[in-house]
Image (cartoon, helix red, strand yellow):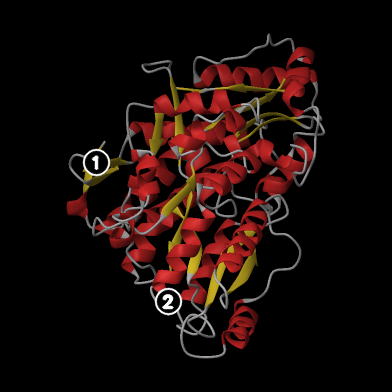
Amino acid sequence: MKKSTTIAGGLMTAAALTVALAGCAGGGGSSADANTIRVAYQTTATFNQMQTLMENAKKQFEASHEGVTVELVPIQAEGPDYYTKLALMNKSASTAPDVQYEDTFKIQSDAAAGYLLPLDDYLAKWDDWSQFAEGAKQAGLGPDGKTYGVSLGTDTRGLWYNKDLFAKAGIPVPWQPKTWADILSAAEKVKAADPDVIPINVYSGKTAGEAASMQGLEMLLYGTDDTLYDTSSKKWVVGSQGFKDSLKFISDVYQGGLGPSLQQALDPNIFTSVTADWLPSSKLAIALDGSWQSAAWIDGGTAPWPQWSDTLGIAAMPTQKGQAPGTTSMSGGWTLALGKNTKNADLAWEFLTTAVNKENATSYDIDNSQIAVRADVAKSTEYLGANPSFETFSSFVDTTHFRPATEDYDKISNQIQVAMEAVMTGQSSVDDAAAAYDQAVIGIVGEENTQKG
């Protein structure tokens, strides 16, 4: 998933958003007329790169399409709130966007809900499609096997660490932990050296949303001998030791005083705190986080920090006990998709391809610290020389994993967050939280669609 980021300024209520969008829609249809393309996308306090991309694409598109208007609809909201607001827009033909910024993990459920238009006929005639990596193509598939989204870039996750704080704690750098125990040991040493520093942040709980599921528990679980979903049997895994061990790690961090306080961890602003405050101010020693983080710190970013590449190191996330292949990661990313209710699908498609062409994809991937999914961008000297973290995070692709591509994932992800919050707050034991998760999964997909880990 694109980084989960923080709410910037006041959020519109659902009712207010409906009224505002209905007012600009002019009634019936996804935009005021067939020559207006409405584009909905996310912006936050630490994520303005999509605004830049959309403004550039609008300028380019309107210049080459006389009489056409591109109506930009930025939705200023952090992850879960963005999904809610976008779903609200899609529930009415009068407010539904023609083009929308779509998280890969939402494509299955949104396609099933009838919000998205299949793109296969367009893709078959689009020469640029051959430039896209196979994994990026798979990420845009809906439950019917059709393609509903075109990738803007992907990401990986690893461990950002503060070299100065490590030196103070007597931890040698460069640092590459071999096991989970090595991570906790480093966090303990940081805590002993400076009690005012947060040793490690792992997103957890319902407030963090998908960041908790993916950057938290799944980064752990996919480093065990178990998995979330068995792709061969097409069944969800319950009762696994790996799931319990992952929850135990979360408990060790939060109940062991190695993470942020519960108040900090459950604050909707935690994403901005990590990116714009804790890491730049050396208040956080280790962050289990994404490849996109440096987008905020580079020149022109939302929280410029010229020293970031000198102060921070990057380590791959180790497997639980160092078992093969030794490291693990999770990858997601975001796409552009067409709304099912668009009045002019051909025009909307042309705008989409303008936004993801080589020139715009290169600028966006550099500005947003994305791992390029277009081959012509990935091998360009402009991209490769733009950011010192690109090479390291790109290397994590070799051992990365993707979230289950099923329409049930969204609901199960929510249950992961519930289980994490139960153990991080001490409201439940690991065994009880795991058992409750298992029962919730069975309730969502049916016992016949589960298997024991």
In front here: 424 or 220?
220
**Which residue is painted at 79% across and 34% down in the image?**
280
> Residue 89 at x, y = what percent?
51, 76
Tell me which amino acid carries mark 1: Thr
Lateral position of residue 264 relative to residue 316, left or right = right
Lateral position of residue 215 relative to residue 218, left or right = right
In front here: 322 or 418?
322
Q: In this view, does 228 lie above or below 309?
A: below
**Which residue is painted at 40% across and 26% down in the image?**
399
> Residue 288 at x, y = what percent?
59, 33
Residue 77 visible in the snapshot: no
Quarter-wise, where is residue 121 in the image? Answer: bottom left
Lateral position of residue 440 relative to residue 15, left or right = left
Lateral position of residue 82 relative to residue 258, left or right = left
> Residue 25 at x, y = what percent?
57, 85
Q: Distance between the residues labelled 2 and 1?
A: 37 Å
**Which residue is painted at 49% across and 77% down in the image?**
96
- Residue at which label 2 appears: 344
Residue 357 visible in the snapshot: yes
Crowd tier of the residue under label 2, counting other residues whose Cα lies within 10 Å: few below 14, some 14–19, many 20 or above? some
Quarter-wise, where is residue 303 in the image? Answer: top right
- Residue at which label 1 appears: 231
